[in-house]
Image (spheres, rainbow, N blue to C red):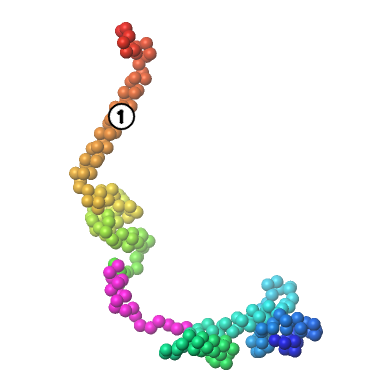
Amino acid sequence: MNADEAAALLAHCSGFDNRQPSVAAAKSWASALRDVPFDQDARDAVAAYYTTPPQNPGDRLWILPHHVRTLRSKIRSARLENFQYEPLANETTAEYLARYRGQVQAIASGRVTGPSGRLALEGGPSREFMRELEAHGWEGNRTVPESDEEAAEAELIDTVRRSGPLGIECPSCGAAMGRPCKTPGGSGKQPLGKPRQKPHSARLRAARGESERTAEERAAQEQRIRAMSARHLARQDSEEDIPDAEIVEPGGAS
């Protein structure tokens, strides 16, 4: 944009803000917009600026060169929103760059109408994709849970649908394979309570391959350790209760 074109753009701005263009202002605007052409998009940028109300109702709108540059760029970018390059078979890099720039310039300037809608994916998933989903445990017959409690239970089932504690029936609460353990409670037809966040200890031991005998031996060992600790504490307490005069030193008289 040269000084004459900048003067014409300032005259266009004066129709909105009643400014008084000058030669000095035209030269300054031309310097700030030297790489921006004086075209319809530049005029539309001025109109777009004055179409938007100020943030504070009492403020006066006053367009500056950077407003013209920014709004003009937005106008041209909007035309390219759904643009997709159309390549040619066996084109070279130089041919690709030339054609790509040409298509972008033609659509951005408005000479060529760009695509009006977004590209959409067509068709369903491939058979290979569906087989991969099924291999990872996907089921196509999912239903919407009727309550929050059922949703929570379904979420727990989904998170543990793999090898682990829920791969076996719980020996403690009787929860079926793939179902979370239940807390005690309830009545009637639902003798168990809500789903537990963690499986019962017996289910964890069974999932690790530990037999009930092993678990009983561990419990017995823990009981023996507690009994030994209790006897040790009792012996310490009895020694503290003996008066100093009754304690016989080794090798001393009785």
- Percent x, y of residue 70: 64, 79
Is 199 displayed left or right of 122 in the figure? left
User: Can residue 51 be seen at all in this image of the molecule?
Assistant: no
Residue 178 locus on image (x, y percent): 26, 59
Picture mark count? 1
Indicate the quadrant containing the C terminus: top left, top right, bottom left or bottom right. top left
- Rendered image quadrant of residue 3: bottom right
Instruction: Please state which of residues 182 and 198 is positioned toward the viewer in this rendering.
Output: 198
Residue 143, compared with residue 61, is above or below; it is above
Q: Amino acid at mark 1?
A: Ala
Q: Residue at x 68, y 88 (%)?
A: 38
23 sits left or right of 168 in the view: right
Q: Is residue 128 magenta?
A: yes
Q: Is residue 146 magenta?
A: no
Element at badge 1? helix
> Quick check: can you spot residue 53?
yes
- Residue at the image position 55 percent from the left and 85 percent from the top: 79
Residue drawn at point x = 70 percent, y = 86 percent: 1
**Tag 1 residue:** 230
Crowding at mark 1 (Cα within 10 Å: few <14, some 14-19, many 20+): few
Quadrant housing residue 135: bottom left
- Vertical arrangement, residue 58 with respect to residue 172, above or below: below
**Viewed as shown, does residue 253 lie left or right of 44?**
left
In this view, the residue in front, 107 or 141, is 107
Rendered view: 183 above or below 125: above
- Left or right: where 27 falls relative to 52: right
Q: Residue at x 66, y 83 (%)?
A: 35
Q: Which residue is situated farthest in the top direction here? A: 253
Q: What percent of the width, then of the height, locates residue 190? A: 27, 55
Q: Which residues are magenta?
A: 115-136
